[in-house]
Image: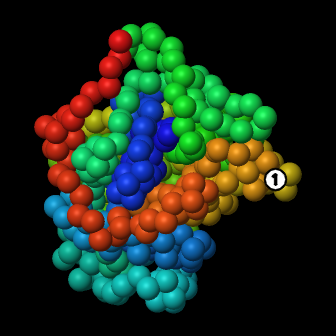
Amino acid sequence: MVIGGGATGAGVAHDLALRGLRVTLLERGELTSGTTGRHHGLLHSGGRYAVGDQESAIECIKENQILRRIAPGSFEENGGLFVALTDEDMDYLNPFLDACEACGIPATVHQAEAARRMEPGLNPAVKVAVEVPDATVDPMRLVLRFFATARRNGADLRTFTEVTGLACAARTVSGVLARDLVTEREYELAADLVVNAAGPWSGQIGQMAGVTVPMQLSPGVLLAVRGRFCGRVLNRLHRSADGDIIVPQRGLSVVGTTSWVVDDPDVPPVPADHVAKMYAEGSKLVPALAAAERRSAWSAVRPLVGAVTPSRGAASTGRELSRTFQCFDHKQAEGVEGLVTITGGKATTLRAMAETGADVVCAKLGIDAACRTAQTVLAPHGAYYTERGERYDRD
């Protein structure tokens, strides 16, 4: 049983179904309706994390290359630029280049004139730009390819099905209690093992079994404006900060993001001052953004592995934590059998997260089946709609 219909759940369902396991996935809303459907739409090169979070950077560049191979046609392979505008940005150049080399991220330096030719809308104050293999992706369509392939291999995908509890006795999880939000029917489903892939809701699922998932919930505001103001992904050449990235998405430009910490992942706020900051910071990279028409603004909650420490306290913003992922076998950690949690990470690393989680699942169930997701080309996203497969009986 897999709980969560976002990128992580999609990857886990695909991986386990490909290994021959019988998989049922439950999602409270529509697929990708949580964090997965709310991010920039960036296929990370790892450049953003190369200096301060090399584990995440290495994961990103490796999975960047794998996803291009197994999901051909899903990406606008437009590349990205890390742009220096100030002397402080220039101080970051050599550490950035050294870190990219250490992480295996291709990086090419372009002087100011060349950078302006590549991106005419850039701030004329640009001093230098570093090209990396970022790309743009439609978050929902990519993840639907994983779901479509999982269903081809027998996975049962149940949307609008809320997990209301875990069947748990003698410190063993044996299934889930579920509510069909369409028919309002409540029922219990048995499982040999439950995988908690609920993203920012993973902690709530863990509490149902009396276990703790160490997490920070870190929302960030994103702003979409009408008009494609750049052809490549643009980043400021400095440590990650508010509003320092612009992702071109079809006829829009997406500017992000802020970062703070909340306790509840449902309905994160969209503070007006955060939106204003996206305009202010984004226009430092591309001045024309200052007058761009707002299309929409929203929040996405990052499920970060870790906890607020007393030294950070209320000052924590979520940027202090790594963007890597972690798999928890709650039998080893807290003596609760039958429950595994996989959380953290990035949308770019969904396949690697799933492989790690699926390896743990197979080991616990005594199944000898290797991961094949890095070599298996995914079904097209449209197959999710056209190949409905057998529907389960809601009655």
Tell me the quarter of the image containing the C terminus. top left
Q: Which colour scheme is used?
A: rainbow
Residue drawn 56% across the image and 76% down it: 54
Q: In this view, does 53 lie above or below 210?
A: below
Horizontal side of 302 relative to 348 (left or right) equals: right
- The residue pinned by badge 1 equals 309
**Residue 33 appears in the figure:** yes
How crowded pointer 1 is (Cα within 10 Å; few <14, some 14-19, many 20+) is rated as: few
Helix, strand or loop at label 1? It is loop
Horizontal side of 35 relative to 388 (left or right) equals: right
Horizontal side of 373 relative to 149 (left or right) equals: right
Question: Residue lying furthest left in this view?
Answer: 386
Residue drawn 29% across the image and 71% down it: 375
Quarter assignment of residue 201: top right
The foreground one among 142 and 357 is 357
**Residue 236 appears in the figure:** no
Residue 379: % across, % down: 20, 54
The amino acid on which the numbered mark 1 sits, given as a three-letter code, is Thr
The foreground one among 297 and 160 is 160
Q: In this view, does 36 lie above or below 295?
A: below
Count up the numbered dots: 1
Residue 289: % across, % down: 30, 50
Residue 23: % across, % down: 42, 43
Residue drawn 61% across the image and 56% down it: 364
Residue 189: % across, % down: 52, 28
Residue drawn 54% across the image and 31% down it: 190
Q: Is residue 65 above or below residue 94?
A: above
